């Protein structure tokens, strides 16, 4: 196990990570397992889940349960949570990572596109939180980490639906923390900027966006990597953040400000 600081030791805990087959979700599952957690990973693509699970088992020796799930389908989310409890015995950590969108101008955005953004980025997190929350409230403990976007903090042109959904996810996090804190449940959020996950890179290519241009817009002058987001998720999921709840932390390479060159 990689953990040396007892505050980051997740031994005996079980984590559910949605969108866990690739990118930030896979990096998060690997890191949580490296610090002692057994994990259940959920996504729609079975091949991605199995590949990531094999890597986790080989590298850490921890249990890694694969649960093919479309988080937009309520019954499948209910099954995800119950199957995890049945197979791994409990749930201590929920990472609502599944999300995404297709960008497009507001003037031509169809109602279906708006609804799809909220179904994937907000409703799915609500259903996952509700189902896992039954176990958290009963056991008097739990950590929820919602993966949002910088779009939910600053907005993004061409993404009215996405930015609104991610902003809603951040407020959902805050209210969850306020209501459930007295039951020993913490909820925090990570607002992700330009992170070069497999799917993000593919989306940028389709949109004709240049990675060098994207990187130049950050004070750090580079894009992030999935593990750099996973590091923050680990902090929120562990006892290192035991007095932190209801917060949204930007992991975005720093603020892009106007003004003079200095």
Image (cartoon, grey):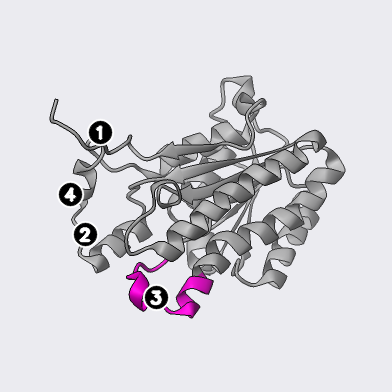
Marks 3 and 2, the one that precedes in the sequence? 3
Residue at image location 32% in from the left, 36% down from the top: 255
Q: Residue 205 occupies which quadrant of the picture?
A: bottom left
Residue 149 image position (x, y, % from top left): 44, 50
Could you give the CA–CA distance between mark 4 and mark 1, rounded to whole angstroms?
A: 12 Å
Q: Are marks 4 and 3 in contact (CB under 8 Å)?
A: no
Q: Are marks 4 and 1 in contact (CB under 8 Å)?
A: no
Any mark on residue 95, and which? none
Report whether residue 21 is seen.
Answer: no
Which element type, helix, strand or loop, lies under badge 4? helix
How many other residues sit within 10 Å of disc 4, few (<14), some (14-19) or many (≥20)? few
Q: Are marks 1 and 3 in contact (CB under 8 Å)?
A: no
Q: Is residue 228 magenta?
A: no
Which element type, helix, strand or loop, lies under badge 2? loop
Q: Which tag is nearer the camera, tag 3 or tag 2?
A: 3
**Residue at the far right in the pictured view:** 138
Task: Identify the residue under disc 2.
Answer: 209
Could you give the CA–CA distance between mark 2 and mark 1, rounded to whole angstroms?
A: 19 Å
**Front residue of this view, candidates 58 and 249:** 249
Task: Identify the residue under disc 4.
Answer: 213
Marks 1 and 3, the one that precedes in the sequence? 3
Any mark on residue 219, and which? 1
How many other residues sit within 10 Å of disc 2, few (<14), some (14-19) or many (≥20)? few
Question: Which stretch did the figure color magenta?
Answer: 101-116
Residue at image location 75% in from the left, 57% down from the top: 131
């Amino acid at each position: 196990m990689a953990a040396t600081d007892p505050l980051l030791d997740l031994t005996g805990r079980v984590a559910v990570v949605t969108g866990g087959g690739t990118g930030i979700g896979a990096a998060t599952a690997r890191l949580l397992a490296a610090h002692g957690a057994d994990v259940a990973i959920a996504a729609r693509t079975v091949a991605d889940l199995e590949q990531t699970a094999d890597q986790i088992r080989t590298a850490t020796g921890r249990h890694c349960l694969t649960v093919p799930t479309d988080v937009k389908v309520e019954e499948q989310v209910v099954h995800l949570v119950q199957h995890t409890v049945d197979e791994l015995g409990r749930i201590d950590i929920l990472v609502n990572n599944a999300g995404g969108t297709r960008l497009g101008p507001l003037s031509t955005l169809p109602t279906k596109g708006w609804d799809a953004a909220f179904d994937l980025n907000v409703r799915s997190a609500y259903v996952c939180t509700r189902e896992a929350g039954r176990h958290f409230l009963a056991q008097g403990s739990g950590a929820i980490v919602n993966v949002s976007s910088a779009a939910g903090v600053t907005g993004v042109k061409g993404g009215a639906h996405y930015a609104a959904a991610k902003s809603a996810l951040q407020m959902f996090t805050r209210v969850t923390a306020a209501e459930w804190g007295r039951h020993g449940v913490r909820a925090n959020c990570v607002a992700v900027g330009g992170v070069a996950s497999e799917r993000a890179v593919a989306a940028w290519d389709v949109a004709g966006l240049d990675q060098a241009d994207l990187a130049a817009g950050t004070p750090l002058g580079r894009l992030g990597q999935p593990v750099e987001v996973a590091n923050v998720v680990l902090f929120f999921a562990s006892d290192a953040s035991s007095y932190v709840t209801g917060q949204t932390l930007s992991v975005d390479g720093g603020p892009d400000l106007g003004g003079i060159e200095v």
